[in-house]
Image (cartoon, grey):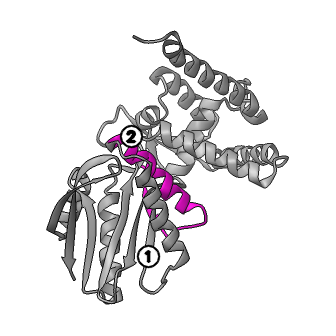
């Protein structure tokens, strides 16, 4: 049965977003009759911005892009035309629609507005220490990414580990395997041992770790370590739920294979569990073969351990 707290949470979240909107619009002054002490309203400035940055557009395209009411947009277009800021040409495919473009006067008006906007934001940021400016812009990027994700898929990247990433590897494995498979803390201890060994005896010429990252946040990992001169071992493949759907698991495994080949290894081996179906599918698709399986009791669970190998 839902608790009073759980029922109230959506209302609290809505109130928090609305409070932030009120704060930020006051901060930028967008509720003033004119934006940045210019002769333009916020909507008019947005239309100018689209025309300045995207070339010739139809009024319909601008309306759809900005979500403006057709009647309201029509009045803006007429005002801009009367003021000599834009040109209007009937579209060949539909002469009821007009292709819009900025005149020289329109570009001058936008340039002045753009400079004012730049200076206004710079003035707002200037009192903040550098660390706070980074926090602010990162938070803005997070908001844009979360609310705009349906329109702009986020790109995932792979990189070498940085200080602090081994903590992510240990924490993410411990938390994810506990919540999804019921593993106890002994699994987290094993991951910590593997990570510590990698840090203490890392062979830069024969071993690698890759961290998968989205919007500056780690969401996955994999290790390729030396077993002996001819055999490499793939370890600690993981992709967090926030990183799934980008093909990261496959990309991480393919990076291991390519690096192992470049190092001259003859074979890659790995140990996994039969219940990890997503990982097993990735290994199989990449060319690994199951060579052994054995039941065991580990991490507080009854499991079937599997050894997979790939000849290079």
Vertical placement of residue 2 versus 51, above or below: above
Whether residue 167 is in magenta: the answer is yes
Q: Position of residue 258 (x, y in %)?
A: 31, 78
Q: Position of residue 241 (x, y in %)?
A: 38, 45
Circle 1 — which element? strand
In which quadrant is the N terminus drawn? top left
Q: Position of residue 172 (x, y in %)?
A: 46, 51
Residue at position x 52%, y 22% in the image: 72
Q: Say how many tags the image has.
A: 2
In which quadrant is the C terminus drawn? bottom left
Of badges 1 and 2, nearer the viewer stands: 2
Q: Position of residue 74 (x, y in %)?
A: 50, 26
Dot 2, crowdedness within 10 Å: few (<14), some or many (≥20)? few
Vertical placement of residue 287 versus 23, above or below: below
Q: Residue 247 vs residue 114: left or right? A: left
Question: Which labelled disc corresponds to residue 179?
Answer: 2
Let me know if residue 91 appears in the view: no
Q: In front here: 263 or 125?
A: 263
Circle 2 — which element? helix
Residue at position x 54%, y 73% in the image: 199
Vertical placement of residue 150 versus 285, above or below: above
Let me know if residue 10 appears in the view: yes
How far apart in space, not on screen, are marks 1 and 2 (Cα)? 28 Å
**Residue wearing tag 1:** 208
Which residues are the magenta region?
153-180
- Toward which corner of the image does residue 247 lie, by quadrant? bottom left
Q: Residue 309 vs residue 127: left or right? A: left
Residue at position x 38%, y 74% in the image: 224
Q: Residue 34 vs residue 142: left or right? A: right
Residue at position x 82%, y 49% in the image: 126
Sequence-earlier tag: 1 or 2 = 2
């Amino acid at each position: 049965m839902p608790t009073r707290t759980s029922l109230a949470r959506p209302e609290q979240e809505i109130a928090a977003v609305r409070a932030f909107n009120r704060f930020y619009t006051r901060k930028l002054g967008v509720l003033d009759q004119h934006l940045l002490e210019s002769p333009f309203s916020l909507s008019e400035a947005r239309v100018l911005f689209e025309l300045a940055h995207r070339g010739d557009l139809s009024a319909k395209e601008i309306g759809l892009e900005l979500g403006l009411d057709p009647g309201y947009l029509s009045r803006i277009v007429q005002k801009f035309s009367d003021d000599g800021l834009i040109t209007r040409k009937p579209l060949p495919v539909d002469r009821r629609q007009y292709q819009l473009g900025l005149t020289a006067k329109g570009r001058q008006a936008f340039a002045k507005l753009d400079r004012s906007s730049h200076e206004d934001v710079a003035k707002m940021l200037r009192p903040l220490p550098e660390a706070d400016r980074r926090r602010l812009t990162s938070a803005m990027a997070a908001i844009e990414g979360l609310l705009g994700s349906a329109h702009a898929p986020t790109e995932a990247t792979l990189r070498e580990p940085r200080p602090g990433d081994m903590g992510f590897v240990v924490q993410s494995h411990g938390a994810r395997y506990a919540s999804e498979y019921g593993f106890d803390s002994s699994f987290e201890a094993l991951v910590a041992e593997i990570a510590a060994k990698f840090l203490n005896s890392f062979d830069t010429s024969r071993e690698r770790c890759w961290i998968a990252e989205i919007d500056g946040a780690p969401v996955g990992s994999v290790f390729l370590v030396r077993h002996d001169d001819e055999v490499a071992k793939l370890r600690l493949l993981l992709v967090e739920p926030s990183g799934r759907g980008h093909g990261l698991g496959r990309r991480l495994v393919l990076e291991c294979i390519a690096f192992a080949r470049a190092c001259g290894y003859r074979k890659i081996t790995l140990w996994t569990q039969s219940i990890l179906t997503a990982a097993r599918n990735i290994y199989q698709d990449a060319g690994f073969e199951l060579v052994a399986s054995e039941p065991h009791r580990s991490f507080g669970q009854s499991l079937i351990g599997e050894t997979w190998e790939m000849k290079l």
